[in-house]
């Protein structure tokens, strides 16, 4: 099993990227190709799906997103391409929220999800995602909203949750700033 690949973005399309790792180009389905830039280094968490007729590689921005994907494909009748489309179309937070709220209507709006699939997803996963979601967002919960939003912004830029603790403490040293100002502090801190 390939857990992650680190390398430079060699190419990308509407739903895939190619990561050049020491001269080997790894093409994989990827939910957020709009967030990558050519020739920049990237770390991608991966899942390899093997069937009798195909071997496919799926890539994710974070370990949390990969874990959600694995939970989604554990639902009967939900394949990896549909799960990837859900993440690509709606994003990690919206998928988790729809499942935890039992919002079948929101799930049905996602590509490839009908009423039966949406109900099955809620039945199988509701209540099982909250601990993971809470655990990954705990640092933001203890800070003012502006800091929490800035930390979420850093996470969306590709910084890992494990890197955000020291940044949050640095931001908290200067209370009363806007989200944009905290984000600037965070970027300066991370670029050291």
Image (cartoon, helix red, strand yellow):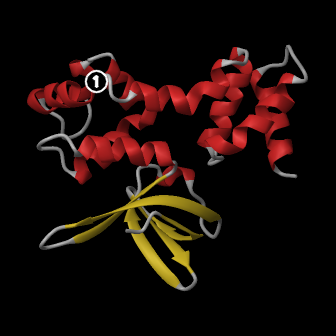
Residue placed furthest toward the bottom: 23
Q: Image height check: is 70 above or below 127?
A: below
Q: Secondary structure at mark 1?
A: loop
| Location of residue 145 (image quadrant) | top right
The residue that appears at 33% across and 28% down in the rendered structure is 128
Give the residue displayed 19% in from the left and 72% down from the top: 54
Left/right placement of residue 187 relative to residue 46 reads right
Q: Nearer the viewer, residue 171 or 13?
A: 171
Q: Residues within 10 Å of mark 1 (few under 14, many from 20)?
A: some
User: Residue, x 44% and y 44% (percent of image)?
Assistant: 65
Of residues 64 and 177, the one nearer the viewer is 64
Where is residue 100 shown, x and y percent of the image?
34, 21
Q: Please state if 192 lies on the left or on the right of 121 as rendered.
A: right
Q: How far across and down, in percent of the image, does residue 184 sit? A: 82, 35
Count the marks: how many? 1
Residue at the image position 63 percent from the left and 32 percent from the top: 152
Give the quarter of the image for residue 183: top right
Please tell me whether residue 19 is drawn above or below residue 158 in the rendered image: below
Above or below, comparing residue 165 to residue 101 in the picture = below
Q: Position of residue 1 (x, y in %)?
A: 37, 68
* 161 horizontally vs 11: left or right: right
**Residue 85 shows in the view:** no
Quadrant of the rendered image containing residue 150:
top right
Q: Is residue 69 visible?
A: yes
Question: Height in image: 45 above or below 153?
Answer: below
**Residue 169 spot, x, y in % from top left:** 82, 29
Pick whichever, 30 or 50, lies toward us. 50
For mark 1, what is the residue?
A: 126
């Amino acid at each position: 099993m390939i857990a992650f690949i680190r390398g430079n973005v060699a190419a990308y399309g509407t739903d895939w990227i190619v990561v050049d790792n020491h001269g080997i180009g790894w093409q994989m389905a990827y939910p957020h190709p709009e967030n990558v830039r050519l020739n920049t280094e990237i770390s991608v968490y991966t899942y390899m799906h093997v069937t009798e007729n195909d071997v496919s590689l799926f890539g994710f921005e974070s370990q949390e997103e990969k874990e959600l994907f694995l939970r989604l494909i554990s639902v009967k009748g939900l394949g990896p391409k549909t799960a990837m489309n859900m993440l690509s179309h709606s994003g990690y937070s919206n998928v988790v929220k729809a499942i935890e709220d039992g919002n079948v209507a929101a799930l049905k709006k996602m590509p490839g999800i009908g009423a039966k699939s949406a109900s099955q997803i809620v039945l199988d996963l509701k209540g099982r995602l909250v601990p993971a979601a809470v655990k990954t967002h705990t640092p933001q919960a203890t800070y003012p909203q502006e800091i929490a939003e800035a930390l979420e912004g850093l996470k969306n830029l590709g910084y890992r949750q494990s890197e955000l603790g020291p940044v949050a403490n640095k931001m908290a040293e200067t209370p009363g700033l806007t989200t944009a100002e905290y984000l600037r502090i965070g970027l300066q801190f991370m670029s050291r």
